[in-house]
Image: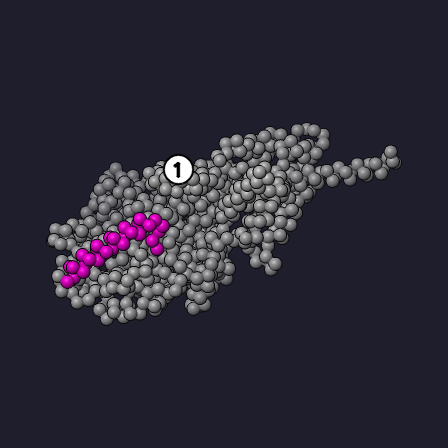
Amino acid sequence: MAEDREWESTETAVAELHKKIKEAFEVFDHESNNTVDVREIGTIIRSLGCCPSEGELHDLIAEVEEEEPTGYIRLEKFLPVMTEVLLERRYRPIPEDVLLRAFEVLDPTKRGFLTKEELIKYMTEEGEPFSQEEMEEMLSAAIDSESNSIHYKDYITMMVEVQLFKEKNKVT
Amino acid sequence: MGSGTSNQHHFAFQNAERALKAAALIQRWYRRYVARLEMRRRCTWSIFQSIEYAGQQDQVKLHDFFSYLVDHFTPSSHNERDFLNRMFTEERFPKDLEMEKCSDYNSIEVPDNYTGPHLSFPLLPDHATALVEAFRLKQQLHARYVLNLLHETRKHLIQLPNINRLSTCYSEEITVCGDLHGQLDDLIFIFYKNGLPSPERAYVFNGDFVDRGKDSVEILMILFAFMLVYPKEFHLNRGNHEDHMVNLRYGFTKEVMYKYKIHGKKILKTLQDVFCWLPLATLVDEKVLILHGGVSDMTDLELLAKLDRHKIVSTLRCKTRKQSEKLAEGKRKASQMSSPGRPTPWFLPMSRSLPSSPLHVGSHKAHKTGRSSSIPCSASLDRKELSQQVRRSVDLELERCRQQAGFPLIREKEPVLFMAEADSDAEQLLQPTQEEWKQVVDILWSDPMAQEGCKANTVRGGGCYFGPNVTEQLLQKYNLQFLIRSHECKPEGYEFCHNRKVLTIFSASNYYEVGSNRGAYVKLGPALTPHIVQYQANKATHMLTTRQRISRVEESALRALREKLFAHSSDLLGEFKKHDADKTVLVSSQLCHDQQK
């Protein structure tokens, strides 16, 4: 009986995930024919709660693409793969404290901030580099114009606060 | 412990690796943040767009419904006929008398204390520039000058062909602007950034100058003034909003009546006669076709060039010429051929499902398979039943009246109503044929779509959705390079589609809300390579971060949606009761779309 209930709850979970995935997919399904441009897949996956790196994203795309890439991803292929990803809780979002430590690694002398130049250098030269657009976007919100630096602790708090608020007030 | 240097190396390497990992982590996190913002923005956009297009669709549907009633209701008494006459007095009086009344602006006196701009005719470039400056300073043009300007504009427009031809030989650069929708700030910005119109600087404004924004009048004055001053270089195309029926709903009529309390009606009446004389399209170097909406698989440029465009006063209401009996017969028989007739009104079931009867309104309608020019009935069964009932009773009444009158056979369309006697020939000539009307509706209302084919534009309620093959077909048929159109708001102010053969250009920035979208215009040089310039005419938006901008627009969208929901709350409650749990879940998850996990 316990197995039954477990099976049931998995079924419901899967059904719910399917619905979520379909809804996110639909936002970008401009032709209403269950396909989306492959360039939007990253946004869809991330909006579903995943936080893959660019490399991981490419792997995922390779999984859902057609054998002969058409530039479009079909829902039929996307749905099972994405469901699996969500069930396995792959690519979990990064907790606040881990993010803070990442910033601290880049700030070894523990000043509490990074200069604009340092941030630009790290974000555009290290890791999976930002594009110019991404960099400018981040700077516009992150940089304190007076000191020309980013006080990362405050920055994180500001960014995460909004997310948390929404999560707490999620309507079921 | 190893030697000092190797330790140092090891340490340095570890440090570098850690920095790399840290950077990658931050980037990963940030990209997710951006994606969620983008998702919110998209949802917000769909909300706005759906509300906007639903409004247009509503108006068209309502209009069709009333038109149908009016056309098929045979008044039983003289009084009723008169009443209906009055209700739909867009019917034109003998032209001359009416026009005389409206051009009687000379009798309007401009008071001494008037501080606005003065115009004298013939207009000079300085006058036009002065107008821009005056409007920038929030002055208002006196009704007398408005009417005078409109009168001169009409005189000028009458000489123009339906399809204007421009060449980059004369003015090296041509700037094409899209929808302005009464947003004067954007027009002023364009002139500021790109330069005022001049013999060396040609402009094409691609329709929808009015409605929604608050300065439609001023925009028209400026555009008409420059057109009179630089007739060879300054061109205007008609948009679907250059239409007094559409203006009734979307704000232009209200704006005119508010700003010109005494002469507003006269101005509006004159405007009808100006709008219908606006050219339908512009062709640059015989290669680039500029028109407001789009095209359909039936678009015929030769027909468009030949027809009398001023006969189409409004694309919403079409009173078309009576077909001869023979023609009606032929059409009924050739129901499988591809000549589209008047669309069956939306509230009537499609022709195929109905029994063939001479009374059947839609039987003459011919459909290409897969292509329908009618607006299909929407969902609810009740409405279908209702409309069937309506149709049946109307048809019955019609039949009875016909029999009484001794009419032999049904004609395609009976404008029985407006004239006490049968339509005179003169009246007939004032009406476009259905084919002509449809051609114009198509180019003013259609939208491109990604799929191949051509189907009815059910969202707007008029025109069609045309696919890349339709574009290709048209470009090849007329040896064109690409199409420039407007009609749709785009987040970046412009968008290419159909393999870069169709360019949408939209010049009203912040259209839905402050921060919702950029505006853009496109410049064409002799090589005809499009060069796009974007802008956002509101300093405040530059200060906001993306997130703040998106949040703001989102709030606005939710507000609009809430209003809609509230307005239809009783209907919605009814629906919910019928469908119970399912519907509830659906709605709340829609509302939660922006509140991601």
From what the image shows, is residue B481 above or below residue B445?
Answer: below
What subunit carries mark 1? B
Give the position of the C terminus of chain B as an image quadrant.
top right
Q: Which residue is mark 1?
A: B562
On the question of residue B172 being in view, the answer is no
Colour convention? one colour
Residue at screen point 62% across, 39% down: A92
Left or right, B31 with respect to B219, comes to right
Mark 1, Cα crowd under 10 Å, few <14 / some 14-19 / many 20+, is: some
Pick the front one: B237 or A135: A135
Kind of element beneath mark 1: helix
Q: Is residue B388 magenta?
A: yes
Image quadrant assignment for residue B118: top left
Q: Position of residue A136 (x, y in %)?
A: 58, 41
Pick the front one: B564 or B291: B564
Main SS of residues in magenta:
helix
> What residue range appears in magenta?
B376-403
